[in-house]
Image (tube, grey):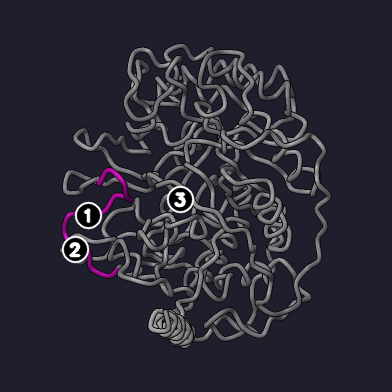
Amino acid sequence: MLAMMKHTQSLFTAIILLLLAAACIPQEPIVVYVTPTLVESLLVSTPVPTLELPTVTVDLPPATETTATSTATRTSPSVIPTVIGSVIGEGYTLPPTSTPRPTNTPLPPTAGASSTPMPTNTPQGPLPTALPGLDPFQMGIQLDPTLNQQDWNQAVVDIQNLGVKWLKVQVAWKTLQPNGPGEITEDFRRLEIYLETAFNSGLDIMVSVAKAPNWARLSNQNEDGPPDNPQDLADFISLMLREFGSSIDAVEVWNEPNLLREWQGNLAFNGVGYMQLFEPSYATIRNYSQNMTIITAGLAPTGDNPTLGSRNDRSFLQEMYNAGLGQYTDVAIGIHPYGWGNAPDATCCDMNPEPGWDDDRHFFFKDNIDDFREIMVNSGHSGAQLWATEFGWASWDGFPGEAPQLWMTYVDECEQGNYSLRAFQIGQSLDYMGPMILWNLNFAMLAGLVESRDERAAYSVLTPLNPRERAAYWMIYDAVRPEEQLGSYSRCPGAG
């Protein structure tokens, strides 16, 4: 018995020593994310929130980078990345789960002719001596709605603090009405509450409606696409407007229909097919409101490639005009003028014989806008505005690991901010340019996107890292507040 007691005492002592030793080992920090559920679902397993809208108050942050990070911690299922961006020429490969890129390693872009020089910056380089005074009523940012109520409210506050007026949300029709026409699901009501929350906080709301449910796509259910019967989309928009149209200021009818992955179905893969979809939706929206802004689908800046399933956006827009777009005098024309690795003032093209990101007009912010405007004017539609429903610059600067694409190393964090500001400034100097929506607010904060090197994270102006805000966030904050002079922007020196 005495031997057994000594053995027990020795075992107890050993356990205590092991616990003390473990306590001295440095622990890895716990990274806290604001996470959504699956991109294709709006938290269908959670209870429907009540219709009582939360009060969202705005306290502008001090002139430092110290806004609080949400402490909500959740896990998220694997997310299938959304393919975004350009597809250009026969020499380019479209990966199934990432932004299109050239098969050859691109050379760093060379800025072409520039009417207004853009300052060059390194992460430690100088900023302009004074930030532009921008009109926040012509500026916006896109937010994914697959968040819980707490994170949605925090995102709304982030946008209010940022200072821009417009919030864009893409409405995935198939997640709100998966089973049949007239259906109002929990996800439908959740989106209604979210948009009412944002609208009541003072933001103008743009919704981009896309992605038909399978019951409306019996002819072809591959990838995403329009309904077989365009009236089905019009009926869904009618239901949406009837239920929460008072929270909506603008409707974009579809998204990037010149990419086949967004247009699998029985409608022709050209501007004529798109106008068949657009016409009944236009009539439905106008029947609801004579003042609501209607925007044609933003087209991806892309060339013709039958193998990859892309249509040249310039040709596609011209086909839309040939099919009668010019008769709609009260619509705006959507455009996605991404600049890739090139500064917003740069124009195509240099004499570099190697393929890269500076040898095609689709890779240049300013050329994309100029080409669209020329088509509008030549088609007798000069009275219509262009609305940039997506634009932005990707940067992997500051993120761990290797950049998903080499061209994402061409733009550092400071240039991402400067390019965004200069693009807003260019747009606001054009009398035919309407609001411009920066892509995106916080995709880098979605669970696992940075770790998995998801390319959507590279465009984000909020991150799960320290500091939470990238330089672009504080540059925009500063640029829409002439009275502010912040001391610094992350690793970038101050502008004052």
Given the image, on which type of amino acid does mark 3 rest?
Answer: Pro
Which of 404/162 is in front?
404
- Identified by mark 2, the residue type is Thr
Q: Amino acid at mark 1?
A: Pro
- Say which of 219 and 394 sits in front: 219
1 and 2 marks in contact (CB < 8 Å): yes
Quarter location, residue 204: top right
Residue at the location (54% across, 44% down)? 389
Mark 3 crowd level (few <14, some 14–19, many ≥20, 10 Å Cα): many
Q: From mark 1 to mark 2, how far is it between C-alphas?
A: 7 Å
Q: Is residue 417 above or below residue 308?
A: below
Task: Classify mark 2: residues with Cα within 10 Å, few (<14), some (14-19) or many (20+).
Answer: some
| Residue 407 in the image, given as x and y percentages of width and height | 31, 64
Observer-nearest of 363 and 307: 307
Taking the magenta stretch, the answer to whether it contains residue 107 is yes
The numbered mark at residue 337 is 3
Residue range of the region highlighted in magenta in the rendering: 95-108
Q: Identify the residue at image location x=53%, y=69%.
A: 417
Give how far across and how far down residue 192 sits, in percent: 70, 33
Q: Is residue 192 left or right of residue 100?
A: right
In 3D space, how far apart are the residues under numbered discs 1 and 3 (Cα atoms)? 19 Å
Chain-order first, disc 2 or disc 3: 2
Horizontal and vertical percent position of residue 464: 52, 66
Quarter where residue 161 is shown: bottom right
Q: Report whether 47 appears left or right of 21.
A: right
User: To which residue does mark 2 refer?
Assistant: 105
Residue annotated with mark 1: 102
Q: Is residue 377 magenta?
A: no
What secondary structure is found at the residue carrying circle 3? Answer: loop
